[in-house]
Amino acid sequence: MGSIVGIGFGAATVEVDLVRRDPKNLLIAAGISLVVSTLYFRRRSPTRAPSCWPAPGPPPETCSLPC
């Protein structure tokens, strides 16, 4: 969020240094976020969804997982 605010502030105050620096920081943060989320979901991939999720209303009696 800081990079987005920095880009906007730099554009509003015509700070060329902020406008040049913050997109790079934003791309680095987005890249780290994608790597971490990829590792997380590869490690814990949902092989199958429980039969009671996502179902509207109260969970059925046959559901063995906390819904």
Image (tube, helix red, strand yellow):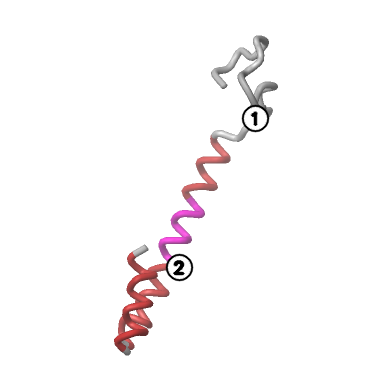
The C terminus lies in which quarter of the figure? Answer: top right
Q: Quadrant of residue 32?
A: bottom left
Dot 1 falls on a residue whose secondary structure is: loop
Q: Position of residue 17 (x, y in %)?
A: 31, 84
Crowding around mark 2 (Cα neighbors within 10 Å: few <14, some 14 to 19, many 20+) is few
Question: Could you tell me if the residues under marks 2 and 1 are in contact, i.e. CB atoms within 8 Å?
Answer: no
**What's the amino acid at mark 2?**
Leu
Measuring 42% from the left and 65% from the top, which residue is drawn there?
28
* Image height of 66 relative to 22, above or below: above
Measuring 32% from the left and 78% from the top, which residue is drawn there?
9
Magenta span: predominant SS is helix
The N terminus lies in which quarter of the figure? Answer: bottom left
In the image, is 67 to the left or to the right of 13? right
Of callouts 2 and 1, the N-terminal one: 2
Between 19 and 58, the one nearer to me in the picture = 58
Does the segment drawn in magenta span residue 28?
yes
Which residue does the numbered mark 1 point to in the structure image? 54
Q: Quadrant of residue 3?
A: bottom left
Range covered by the magenta-colored residues: 27-35
Q: CA distance from mark 2 to mark 1?
A: 34 Å
Crowding around mark 1 (Cα neighbors within 10 Å: few <14, some 14 to 19, many 20+) is few
Measuring 46% from the left and 54% from the top, which residue is drawn there?
33
Q: Position of residue 59 (x, y in %)?
A: 62, 18
**What's the amino acid at mark 1?**
Pro
Dot 2 falls on a residue whose secondary structure is: helix
Which residue does the numbered mark 2 point to in the structure image? 27
